[in-house]
Amino acid sequence: MRTLTRAIAPAAALVAVLATAPLASAEGPVPTSHSTVVPGTSVELSEAGVRDAQTRAVAAENPAAVRATASLCGSGYELENAERLPDARRFGTLFTYTKHTTSKDGACAVFDNNLGTAKKMKLKLCPNLTDAPCKVDEGTFSQYAGPVKYETTGRDSVDCAEVTAIMWSSGVPIIDRVKSVAPCD
């Protein structure tokens, strides 16, 4: 009986693991390659962008916006996040990009106005570094606010940089979003 129990126990454990493992997302498989390019563009997704179903969906729906906002940030930037704001109504889209090379790290954000009419907007990027000033673009924009970009050299890092995107209509904020540019520990 002990021999039978020893033989069945590992198989039972495997069945239990498989039975409780999460099922594949209904939004399709998650790409596993870090060098995934947004369809219809030459813009690469960062590792976080590859893992985020919302970012992949927004980017696939809007390749022209991804191309345009990436070109504003400059070469070497990868799409980190694309978020409809304030929700599925999509008054605006916040695009964040990151760059990590041996000589330079960077964070960049562009806040796309999707309403078709000029709105007062503010986009602020604050690095997570002592005594480093925030970069701000504020005004009335019909297309986008930004880019706001922060790049470092040497040992500095832009990890945990924070971006704020605000859009007003008749003096009332209709979008007010604060988030990290990249995943933060």
Image (spheres, rainbow, N blue to C red):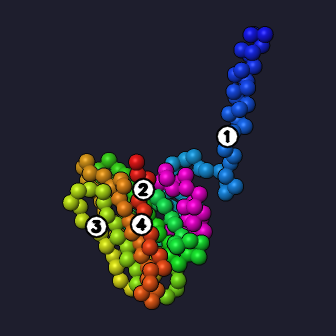
Q: Secondary structure at mark 2?
A: loop
Q: Secondary structure at mark 4?
A: strand
Which numbered disc, 2 or 3, marks the residue that appears first in the sequence? 3
**Amino acid at the residue labelled 2:** Ala
Mark 4 → mark 3, Cα distance in angstroms: 14 Å
Coordinates of residue 76 in the picture (x, y in percent): 39, 58
Q: Secondary structure at mark 3?
A: loop
Residue drawn at (24%, 65%) of the image:
133
Residue drawn at (69%, 27%) of the image:
13
**Amino acid at the residue labelled 3:** Cys
Q: Main secondary structure of the magenta part?
A: helix
Compared with 184, 38 (above or below) is below
Write down the residue under mark 3: 134
Q: Secondary structure at mark 1?
A: loop
**Amino acid at the residue labelled 4:** Val
Residue 136 is one of the magenta-drawn residues: no
Q: Are marks 4 and 3 in contact (CB under 8 Å)?
A: no
Alpha-carbon neighbours of circle 2 within 10 Å: few (<14), some, or many (≥20)? many
Say if residue 86 shows up in the picture. Answer: yes
24 left or right of 58 in image: right
The label number, if any, that marks residue 21 in the structure image:
1
The label number, if any, that marks residue 182 in the structure image:
2
Compared with 52, 69 (above or below) is below
Alpha-carbon neighbours of circle 1 within 10 Å: few (<14), some, or many (≥20)? few
Mark 4 → mark 2, Cα distance in angstroms: 12 Å
Residue 54 is one of the magenta-drawn residues: yes
Range shown magenta:
46-67
Compare residues 153 and 39 and report the one nearer the observer. 153
Coordinates of residue 127 in the picture (x, y in percent): 31, 60
